[in-house]
Image: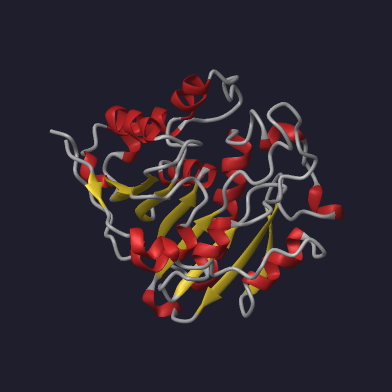
């Protein structure tokens, strides 16, 4: 099965859409600057308080596009765990602000951007081996329920970057209102991912590949950077095999790696439709 090759090399020379990184402002203030004009919200769920940004211009459209952030700053080094998983550069947020849909929600992961009383339940487990634990998935699911209820959206489209792609897939397997699943550099089979690098397994985490049967009927698009050494192509391929999905749901992006240059490319990538092509 041939991979779809998306010829966007020229666009990779563009500058980032995000404001310049400033070492003198907090990561939260940096995110606020990216999301200028959006409404900032805190979603209180059973276990965590989740930070989000939302832009709703045509609620009558009935569909909410939801972007889920990556793992953020989980580790300071290969062996030293971070005390704060807030991303230094929130790629999913940068993508969300450039998304063409009328109704868009960005959700940070548990404990990202959380300060003071909003750090309840935050412990390193939830951004290390338990980053995809049932309780973290449940928290995102509850936040989405809250957002959907405000305007009675009939459907959601889930978008996730890196570990946010893992979350998006896990959520898609657990919801009945998902019209499409789109991931960018997504960890769609974390068992294959950690095994490839010889890392410790994410033993307290759910794995999208285990939900392959539930996901097979959902329209999907998975973007992988040709130069991505962090989440290599084999991870997505392992997921596709287990879900028995055609490689037509996979788009290999020339010259892109794990971080560059997804936000710059997003206005074009967002036009590539999801597909539902079981491998028969």
| Residue 84 x/y as whole percent | 77, 45
Residue at the farthest left position: 280
Q: Is residue 2 left or right of residue 150?
A: left
Q: Is residue 153 left or right of residue 244?
A: right
Q: Nearer the viewer, residue 272 or 67?
A: 272
Give the vertical position of 165 relative to 126 (above or below). Answer: below
Residue 145 in sight: no
Which of these two is toward me, 269 or 213? 269
Query: Residue at left 68%, top 39%?
Result: 74
- For image coordinates 19% across by 44% down, the residue present is 277
Taking the spot 76% from the left edge, 38% from the top edge, the residue there is 82
Q: Is residue 81 above or below residue 171?
A: above
User: Residue at (67%, 51%) from the top-left corner?
Assistant: 87
Please, is residue 1 above or below residue 105 in the view? above
Q: 279 above or below 204? A: below
Percent coordinates x, y for residue 22 in the rendering: 75, 65
Where's residue 187, x and y in %?
Answer: 47, 37
In the visual, does 170 lie left or right of 176?
right
Image quadrant where one finds the C terminus: top left
Q: Which sits in the foreground, 208 or 156?
A: 208
| Quarter of the picture holding the N terminus | top left
């Amino acid at each position: 099965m041939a991979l779809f090759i998306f010829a966007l090399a020229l666009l990779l020379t563009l500058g980032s859409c995000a404001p310049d990184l400033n070492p003198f402002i907090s990561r939260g203030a940096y995110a606020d600057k990216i999301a200028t004009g959006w409404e900032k919200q805190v979603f209180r769920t059973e276990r965590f308080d989740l930070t989000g940004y939302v832009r709703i211009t045509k609620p009558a459209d009935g569909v909410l596009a939801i972007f889920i952030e990556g793992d953020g700053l989980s580790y300071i080094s290969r062996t030293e765990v971070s005390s704060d998983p807030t991303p230094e550069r929130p790629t999913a947020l940068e993508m969300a602000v450039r998304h063409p849909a009328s109704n868009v929600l960005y959700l940070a992961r548990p404990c990202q951007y959380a300060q003071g009383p909003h750090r309840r339940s935050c412990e390193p487990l939830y951004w290390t081996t338990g980053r995809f634990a049932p309780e973290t998935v449940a928290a995102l699911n509850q936040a989405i329920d809250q957002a959907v209820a405000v305007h009675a959206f009939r459907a959601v489209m889930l978008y996730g970057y890196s570990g946010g792609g893992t979350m998006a897939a896990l959520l898609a397997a657990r919801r009945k209102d998902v019209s499409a699943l789109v991931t960018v550099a997504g960890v769609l089979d974390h068992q294959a991912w950690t095994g490839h690098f010889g890392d410790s397994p994410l033993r307290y985490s759910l794995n999208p590949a285990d939900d392959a049967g539930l996901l097979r009927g959902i329209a999907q698009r998975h973007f992988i950077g040709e130069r991505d050494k962090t989440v290599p192509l084999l991870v997505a391929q392992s997921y596709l095999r287990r879900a028995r999905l055609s490689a037509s749901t996979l788009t290999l992006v020339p010259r892109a790696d794990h971080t560059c240059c997804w936000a710059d490319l997003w206005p074009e990538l967002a036009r590539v439709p999801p597909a539902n092509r079981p491998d028969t």
